[in-house]
Image: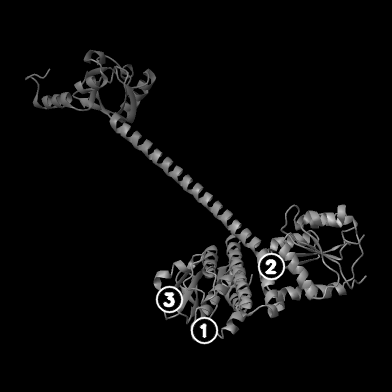
């Protein structure tokens, strides 16, 4: 199915980075508000619907996850590995969004089943470009429903 | 014993016999028994004259046993002489000495006699042994020292590697918050410009400029650590392709600075690592474009074949030049000669040096203030045939 208004879960321990992403996506015309998880463990709790996250009207399952790599408790790699072992969630789209452009990080993410790897751009223009493209891409993509 | 009745030659012989500083024994070849001994040998071995006379050689320890003694005599009678260079002996009081033993058969009138000359070589042997021991000790010390040096070198290499890994991970970690700084400072300028006064906009721009500079620093630090740590295989490389790729990597900077680049030169094949060599050339070209005042930069790339199968690649500019006293320092990290008027991180030439070093090459320059700089790197020449493989 084509999703016109994708739900995006941003997993990043850096509040500034998360706020910047949300500002940029708003500017790019994202309709539904972004959802946030502050580290890998919280992302897993969100996706499992644990505790407060059980309320799917407030915390809906995302269309796509924007995943940072370097985080406390559980890092991005661990989230990827966990996701691919969840029968219900294994088709969820995960786009890694990291400041690292290290070849070994990129390789490892794809090995763990990431759908794409985006390096955080240094300037606003690059960020806007990324957000616009991503939204356009999501509107073109057929997403297989989860849950 | 010396009497006037003796003939002169006999007298001379007796004097020699008595005064000799070597031991002398006279034997009867028929009985193998000692018939005369000189004073030196008595003193040396500690036996009295009576203890020598009538004895066989093995009885005073000069040969191992009777069998050895018989064998020695057979050899003596066949060859006319025997010689032992190094014979261990024991004196009467149990002291161990070493002697050189020479024995000859003489015709004395109508009978044969055997004369044995016994020279004390204990001191010489001791000296030789001491020398050997000293030699051994010396080589042991040398080996120990070598081991110590190689261990220290290894430790240093290891801590150097750890340091480089640390630098790389710090550079990576600093990048994430930097992204936010850059993003928000630009949002401030673009989205909130109307609410800021002139000074507010300037401040936001300063934050942004500083963030861009820091980003470049981190990128260069990562490049330096990558060039230091990556696995490098040295193979024949077509220089023209690498130069072309390096120039296209500098295209933006060349266009922005309105520079003229002359790269008409024969480009022989060299033994190198293509990616590393490209990075080295990009940095040298970037450097050549950067330090020019009041005119358009002119950069010239060319090669020169040097003795010993070496290719020297020149990157020359018409920039401000570098005083000779700084020629070594500029290759060290964070050594910048100029303040902010020339954008640079102070890492570019360190990357050049590290890269060239990893390719077993050399780097250098000739330059003087106002006369531009001519940087060169040297790499081994490869046979063009090796490229086609």
Q: Which chain carries label 3?
A: B
- Which mark, residue B180? 2
- Which mark, residue B367? 3
Q: x, y (%) of residue B339?
A: 49, 73
Q: Quadrant of residue B80?
A: top left
First reached walking from the N terminus: tag 1 or tag 2: 2
Looking at the picture, do discs 3 and 1 lie on one chain?
Answer: yes
First reached walking from the N terminus: tag 3 or tag 1: 1
Q: How crowded is mark 2: few (under 14 residues within 10 Å), some or many (20 or more)?
A: many
| Secondary structure of residue under mark 3 | strand
Q: In which quarter of the image is residue A54?
A: bottom right
| Secondary structure of residue under mark 1 | loop
Q: x, y (%) of residue B387?
A: 61, 71
Q: Quadrant of residue B162?
A: bottom right
Q: Mark 1 lies on which chain?
A: B
Looking at the picture, do discs 1 and 2 lie on one chain?
Answer: yes
**Front residue (pair B141, B202):** B202
Instruction: Kindly identify which residue carries mark 1.
Output: B297
Q: How crowded is mark 3: few (under 14 residues within 10 Å), some or many (20 or more)?
A: many
Q: Is residue A136 visible?
A: yes
Q: Which chain carries label 2?
A: B
**Front residue (pair B306, A135):** A135
- Colouring used for the render: one colour
In the rendered image, the quadrant that contains the C terminus of chain A is bottom right
């Amino acid at each position: 199915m084509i999703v016109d208004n994708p739900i995006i879960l941003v997993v990043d321990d850096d509040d500034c980075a998360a706020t910047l992403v949300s500002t940029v996506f708003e500017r790019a015309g994202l309709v539904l508000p972004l959802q946030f998880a502050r580290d890998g463990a919280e992302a897993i709790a969100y996706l499992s619907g644990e505790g407060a996250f059980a309320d799917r009207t407030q915390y809906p399952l995302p269309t796509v996850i924007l995943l940072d790599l370097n985080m406390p408790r559980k890092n991005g790699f661990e989230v990827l590995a966990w996701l691919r072992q969840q029968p219900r969630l294994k088709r969820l789209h995960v786009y890694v969004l990291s400041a690292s452009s290290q070849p070994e990080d990129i390789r490892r993410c794809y090995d763990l089943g990431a759908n794409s790897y985006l390096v955080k751009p240094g300037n606003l223009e690059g960020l806007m470009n990324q957000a616009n493209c991503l939204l356009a891409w999501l509107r073109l993509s057929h997403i297989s429903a989860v849950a | 014993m010396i009497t006037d009745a003796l003939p002169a030659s006999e007298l001379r012989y007796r004097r020699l016999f008595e005064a000799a500083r070597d031991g002398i024994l006279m034997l009867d070849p028929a009985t193998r028994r000692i018939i005369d001994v000189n004073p030196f040998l008595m003193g040396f071995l500690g036996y009295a004259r009576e203890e020598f006379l009538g004895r066989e050689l093995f009885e005073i320890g000069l040969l191992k046993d009777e069998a050895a003694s018989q064998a020695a005599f057979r050899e003596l009678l066949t060859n006319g002489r025997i010689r032992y260079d190094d014979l261990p002996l024991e004196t009467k009081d149990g002291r161990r000495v070493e002697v050189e033993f020479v024995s000859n058969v003489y015709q004395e009138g109508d009978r044969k006699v055997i004369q044995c000359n016994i020279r004390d070589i204990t001191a010489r042997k001791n000296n030789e042994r001491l020398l050997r021991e000293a030699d051994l000790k010396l080589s042991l010390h040398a080996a120990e020292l070598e081991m110590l040096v190689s261990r220290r070198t290894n430790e240093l290499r290891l801590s150097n590697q750890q340091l480089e890994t640390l630098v790389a991970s710090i550079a990576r970690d600093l990048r994430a918050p930097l992204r936010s700084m850059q993003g928000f400072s630009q949002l401030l300028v673009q989205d909130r410009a109307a609410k800021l006064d002139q000074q507010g906009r300037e401040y936001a721009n300063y934050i942004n400029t500083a963030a861009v500079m820091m980003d470049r620093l981190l990128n260069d630090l990562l490049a330096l650590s990558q060039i230091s740590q990556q696995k490098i295989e040295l193979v024949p490389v077509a220089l023209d392709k690498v130069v072309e790729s390096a120039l296209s990597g500098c295209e933006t900077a060349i266009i922005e600075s309105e520079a003229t680049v002359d790269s008409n030169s024969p480009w022989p094949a060299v033994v190198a690592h293509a990616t590393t060599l490209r990075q080295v050339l990009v940095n040298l070209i970037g450097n050549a474009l950067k330090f020019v005042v009041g005119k358009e930069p002119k950069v010239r790339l060319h090669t020169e074949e040097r003795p010993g199968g070496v290719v020297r690649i020149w990157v020359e500019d018409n920039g401000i030049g570098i005083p000779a006293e700084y020629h070594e320092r500029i290759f060290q990290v964070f050594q910048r000669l100029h303040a902010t008027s020339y954008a640079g991180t102070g890492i570019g030439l360190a990357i050049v040096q590290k890269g060239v070093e990893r390719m077993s090459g050399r780097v250098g320059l000739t330059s003087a203030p106002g006369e531009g700089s001519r940087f060169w790197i040297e790499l081994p020449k490869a046979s063009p045939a090796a490229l086609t493989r």
